[in-house]
Amino acid sequence: MSDNLTGDLTRIAKGLWWLVLLRGIFAIIFGILAVWAPFAALTGIVIVLGIYLLMAGITEIVHAVRIRKADRRWGWLLFQGIVSVLGGLAALFLPGLAGLVGGIFILWTIVVYAGFHGVLTLASAAGVGSKEAKGLAIFSGIVSILLAIVLAIFTILTPGSTVLSLIWVVGIYAVIFGIILIVAAVRARR
């Protein structure tokens, strides 16, 4: 029975590899834009972040629904997708809160999102089949949690300069996360 389940999960992963690849590409595009134009209007970055979170969340939800019969831990991925969608909606509907107050709100939204995303990624890593994929999922979860911790500390200590630094930190994080997703997608396709 275990071999059948493993074979089924492998077929599912191969069929859905492009969804993970798409998430990785969107993450890298967002990261490059954030690093390349750090002094662009914060409202523009918030809209891009909101779109990314919405697309990532929708992709996670679709993926979760598709694997619900094959993997009993699909609920973690579904919850992760819902958190991503809610984070995206919050970012899209509050873009006018520019300046320090809006930036701090956005920072805390990202802190909460990255923390939840990291914890949920670590929880869902238990259901990943191969050692390499499990390692990538664990690494990704740890990076998300570390981002949340670092942003929380700097937001408390130096809120003004942290808002400006947010663009670079999130951009670099998005590029790293996108690369991880692309590597995972290519490996899943094989």
Image: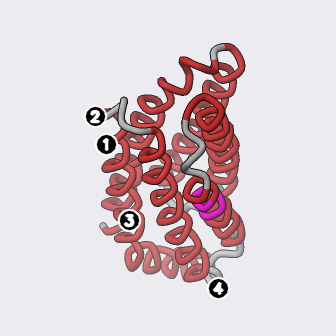
Marks counted in the figure total 4
Callout 2, which amino acid? Trp
Q: CA distance from mark 3 to mark 2?
A: 31 Å
**Real-space Cα distance between discs 3 and 1?**
28 Å
Q: Which residue is depicted at the point 36% across and 57% down?
A: 26
Q: Is residue 104 above or below residue 177?
A: above
Instruction: Please state the horizontal and vertical placement of residue 151, each as a whole percent of the image.
Output: 61, 28
What's the residue type where badge 1 is placed?
Answer: Leu
Residue that carries the numbered disc 2 in the rendered image: 36
Q: Disc 4 vs disc 2: which is toward the camera? A: 2
* Whole-percent x, y for residue 54 in the image: 52, 64
The mark nearer the N terminus, 4 or 2, is: 2
Q: Nearer the viewer, mark 3 or mark 1?
A: 1
| Residue pointed to by mark 1 | 33
Quadrant position of the C terminus in the picture: bottom left
Asked if residue 54 is positioned above or below residue 100 in the image, the reply reads below
Q: Tags 3 and 1 in contact by the CB under 8 Å rule? A: no
Q: Residue at x 64, y 56 (%)?
A: 90
Which residue is depicted at the point 35% across and 62% down? 21
